[in-house]
Amino acid sequence: MTAIRIDRISKTFVSSRTGEQVVALKDVDLEVSQGEFVAIVGPSGCGKSTLLSIIAGILEPTSGAAYHYDAPILGPSPDRGVLFQDYALFPWLSVRQNISFGPRARGVPSSEWQQEVDRLISVVGLSGFDTRLPHELSGGMRQRCALARMLANEPRTWLMDEPLAAVDLQTRTLLQEEILRIWGEDQPPADRPAVMFITHGIDEAVLLADRVIVLGRRPGRVKADLKIDLNRPRFEHRDLAAEGVLVQQIWDQIRDEARSAILED
Amino acid sequence: MINDYHLLTAKLIIVYQIESQVCLKRKCMSRETRKIQRVASAVTAPIVGCAGLYAAWTAASWWLENPILLPPPNSVLTALVSIMQDELVGDILASLHHLGVGMSFGVTIGFALAVLATQNRLVERLVDPLIELLRPISGIAWIPLAIMMFGVGETVPIFLIAYVSVFPIYINTVAGIAGVDGRLINAAKVLGAPPSTIRWHVILPSALPMILAGFRLSLGVAWMTLIGAELIGGNSGLGWRAFWYEQFFAMNKNLAVILVVGVLGFLFDGIIRLLQARLLRWSPAQSGAAT
């Protein structure tokens, strides 16, 4: 079953200062199946985040259309959960209040979400921190809190925008493992959400995903679509040699554009 | 003589202060001792400042030898005790009444205009230039017109307080709402929050630090304007009373009232700072407001 379908999407930004047009995405076609973990990699400026924002419904494409379970995406929906790179936690709410924000905002009676929120707090390892405020947490804990906040809505699709870019390496490794566990990598695809995971880290993409999509830049478009046939659960059967080959293969696709991206910035 | 005693006390405090600073620099003492020294310094320094002013004031009044031109501070304190037992409470209540009613109007109008201006372009284009045009005009400038319109009485100070308190709350609320982090609004949207929830549970708390800072500024300028407005256009309150005493050359009582004005203004500001610290505990930048 197709969870996300992107149909010839283009997005052009017009600079309000110079009037200059920047083509962020050009004729992008993409499909993500139910239960599939798709990582998107590409150099800076390839429109990764733009694509995710369009699927999240917080940005409209200039042309083309996006569908979620065959329904056109016209705006944000709690069915498509988003995890932001900078957490975007509400700083005035405690961990618990942040996590329960979705159900509360949607008017779900508290009897229906109390237990689930308690469970999520322990799933993401924040037991005992539920009354803390975001500024009292470490970066890793903030991202755990944001993950639990997304999960509290029980979305059918996870949209993750470089969620681990701002945490240290050890925390990142731990969180990668946790994300796969919570996603349900040992479950059949029908029982777990579709994931679109944007990252700068090619090794991270190879480690986590079933498929890695490489976007090119100027204009942003799909350059390559690679299947990652490594055994799951990934952290139990790590095959560093096979991972290395795949990482190299993807890096070959990106190298030249990444270099020119650095020169331009 | 009482003044000699005061001078001596001030001198002793200064000596103690210097000593304690020297001790602080030596690393000979335990952490607890140093902490006590720091607290003692935080307490003694303001006392030294007040004592210095008191001493200078006393010296100046001796030199002038004219209790009407500049009454010595001890006679002002005596006058303060005497008016406290008499009319002061009524005057304070009258001023608080002017302040409360005036600010209720001003803050409500300023806040409402700011919310409308941030929601609607047309309102913004209508209101913003007017605010910017009127803002530099001191509230005092409207006293003659206010007296003409309302006559001398409580309406003049209430009107002026309402007028001056509109601007800071308007400007800060606009800036606060404009400065809301768009990422938080997006986060709320993707979590399924309807617009009203975003307005009350995302935008309002985000803008609250700026709004409270605006309220604090409004209160400060309102309190300053209050005294002038009562003094010229009112028939009750602390400003009016200060002027009334002056008519009888009771300058010690006049200064006693001014002292009360200062202390009350300080207290109001302290209350707002406590409120800020309490409501903005979540903001590392703001929660220090009370310290």
Image: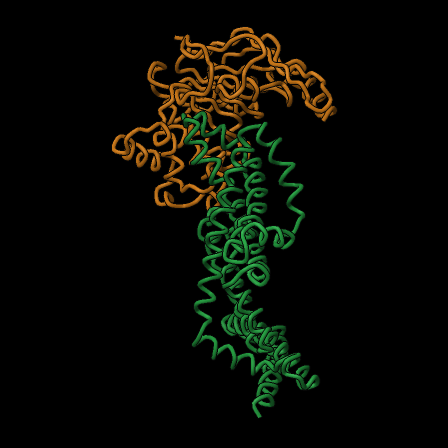
Q: Residue at x 68, y 17 (%)?
A: A22
Which quadrant, please, contains the N terminus of chain A?
top left
Give the x, y percent position of residue B39.
52, 70
Q: Chain letter for orange, please.
A: A
Task: Report which quarter residue B75 is drawn in.
Answer: bottom right
Q: Where does the image place residue A18, in percent across and percent down from the top left?
A: 73, 22
Which of B241 and A223 lies nearest the eye of the viewer?
B241
Percent from the top left, x then y, of residue B169?
55, 45
A165 over A69 or under it: above or below: below
Residue drawn where x is 57% and y is 18% of the image: A245
Residue A178 can be seen, yes or no: no
Which residue is found at the position 45% from the left and 75% from the top? B84
Left or right: where does residue A139 sit relative to residue A69?
Answer: right
Above or below for A195 versus B112: above
- Chain drawn green in the picture: B
Q: Nearer the viewer, residue B207 or B161?
A: B161
- Image vertical order of residue B184 relative to residue B157, above or below: above
Front-most of A28 and B283?
B283
Residue A139 visible in the shown view: yes
Seen at 41% across and 19% down, the residue is A157
- Give coordinates of residue B28: x percent, y percent: 58, 76
Picture layout, residue A117 above or below residue A206? below
